[in-house]
Image: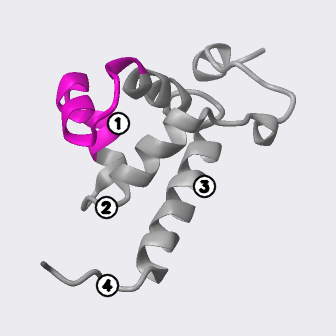
Amino acid sequence: MATKAEAHVVFVADPSDVELAPEILELLERSAAMTHGLAFVHCAPCECVATALGVHPHTVDRVREHLDDETRGVVIRAYARALERRRAAPPVEAP
């Protein structure tokens, strides 16, 4: 018999088959420029995230849906790749 926690889990054949929409990838790229960017996207008020990152609030909601289900690993890996690209980029000089 399934435990109470297991009863609420939804399973997908393979979460790695999930492709993220371009607007979600753009949100993750923008959030990688911030300290604790993914936590900000996940926990801050939706309108604040949308305004700070210049995206539509529905995009923030879609990312949060991924973070709250079995596809969270796909989002976290995409965010980690965005962080790596940001770290590898040469520093930009101030004007």
Residue matched to label 2: 33
Number of residues whose C-alpha sits closer than 10 Å to that of mark 2, classed few (under 14), some (14–19) or many (20 or more)? some
Q: Main secondary structure of the magenta part?
A: helix
Residue matched to label 3: 77
| First-in-chain label (3 vs 1) | 1
**Magenta span has 43?**
yes
Residue matched to label 4: 91
In the rendered image, the vertical position of residue 67 relative to residue 59, given as above or below:
below
Residue with the most extreme right position: 13
- Disc 1 on helix, strand or loop? helix
Quadrant the N terminus occupies: top right
Specify the amino acid type for callout 4. Answer: Pro
Q: Residue at x 66, y 22 (%)?
A: 6
Tell whether label 2 touches label 1 (CB within 8 Å). Answer: no
Q: Position of residue 82 (x, y in %)?
A: 50, 61
- The mark closer to the camera, 1 or 2, is 2
Q: Position of residue 81 (x, y in %)?
A: 56, 63
Colour scheme used in the picture?
one colour
Q: Tell me which segment is drawn in magenta.
A: 40-58
- The mark closer to the camera, 2 or 3, is 2
Residue matched to label 1: 42
* Whole-number angstrom distance, CA of label 1 to CA of label 4: 28 Å
Query: Foreground residue, 11 or 91?
Result: 91
Q: Position of residue 53 (x, y in %)?
A: 27, 41
| First-in-chain label (2 vs 4) | 2
Query: Foreground residue, 66 or 58?
Result: 58
| First-in-chain label (1 vs 2) | 2
Q: Quadrant of residue 49?
A: top left
Number of residues whose C-alpha sits closer than 10 Å to that of mark 1, classed few (under 14), some (14–19) or many (20 or more)? some
Quadrant the C terminus occupies: bottom left
- The mark closer to the camera, 2 or 4, is 4
